[in-house]
Amino acid sequence: MKKIQKRTPLILFTAFAISLLLTSCGSKNNQGQFGRTATVSVATVEYASAPTQQEYHSTLVANKQTNLISDVGGRVEALLFNEGGYVKKGQPLYNIDKSRYQAIYDQAVAQLKIAQTNLITDKTDAQRYQNLWNHNAVDKIQLDHANAQVEVAKATVISAEANVAHAKTDLDHATVVAPFGGTTDVSKVRLGDLVVANQTPLVTIVDNTNMMADFFIPEGDYVKLGASDKNIKDKLSHFNLILPDGSAYQHKGKLDFVDNTVDPTTGTIMARLTFPNPGAILKSGMNCVVRSTQNNNGEKSIIIPQQAVQQLLDEYYVYVVNDNGIVKETEIKPGLTSGNMQIILSGLKPGQKVIVEGIEKVKPNEKVNTVPYSNGPAKTN
């Protein structure tokens, strides 16, 4: 019979070799990729002047804009303006058929004349009964009745005068006039179209003399700006409007107001700027960007490249490299931005080194090689 050979020493040797290999790989991983220490680019934390700016999307709205609707109805008999042109306040724009309103007005005037005549008659009768009463020729009841008739006649005259005024208003409004000066768009009705009172749109008039730019400030920015209307107006002292083609509008804006509540659905506060529009370049409905520039007085702040800041949920942190080349994760409180630089409110001191490029290659407590940060890519070994 053949003896079965024992393989236990071979198995133990193989397991020992694998263990050594894994240990060696783990050691190499701690040293970085391919067993070398990672090289990262670092920037020095500075204490320097940092003008800041924010950009907010905005849709322009004219200071005055209305969709003109007539409060009387009828057929359009005339268009009295040039579509797309400028109209003055009070300028006639449309004639609506007046025949019915003229008839109602004439009837109201006639009723007023009747009421006025009846009043004169009733006053005469009342005076006659007063004289008879003074001579004890009539009963007191007859005198009171005559005086009551005078009061009724007076009320009838007042009612008739109101009817005349109402009819005159409708007659006048059959000629639709511009409520303010501005430019018009294309008329929405033509000759012969039927206009329904208080329903049919006629034309849109826009006064582009001043334009309003409504925008929404995130509540976090609002707090950073000082959390009060006065502070915001002081700090946001300069406004630029960036047009859809990317160019800056030549006229400066003025902060009109800041809303007094936060929209709970968006977490923003509405603010409004007004811009002069002498050349009529700005148009209602235009999509622009409001850019605010702050801190133009040279105040200094702690700043680092914005690229160095990392965020995890509501926490912000950076990787700091100490004098021994060891990486430390440091929590910070960021402020506003200044171009591509981030203002730091707390967590860093001037002179410290923060990793800007190569963050993905390192972990806290690891040793790294460093090169100065520049706008170009970092060189690695």
Image: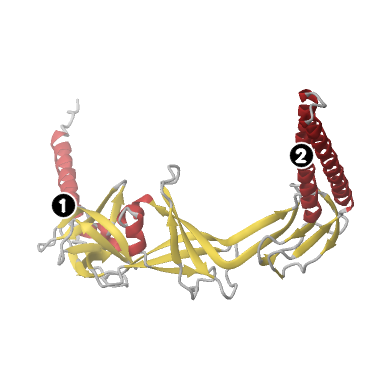
* Foreground pick, 246 / 25: 246
Report if the CB atoms under discs 2 and 1 are less than 8 Å apart. no
Which quadrant of the rendered structure holds the C terminus? Answer: bottom left
Is any part of residue 358 visible from this angle? no
Badge 1 amino acid? Ser
- Residue pointed to by mark 1: 27
Label 2 or label 1, whichever lies nearer to me, is 2
Residue drawn at x 16%, y 45% as measured from the top left: 17
Disc nearer the start of the sequence (2/1): 1
Which quadrant of the rendered structure holds the N terminus? Answer: top left
Q: From the viewer's perspective, tell me whether residue 366 is left or right of residue 220.
A: left
* Foreground pick, 52 / 30: 52
Residue drawn at x 88%, y 56% as measured from the top left: 192
Badge 2 amino acid? Lys
Task: Give SS at disc 1.
Answer: helix
Residue drawn at x 15%, y 59% as measured from the top left: 367
Which mark is drawn over residue 154? 2
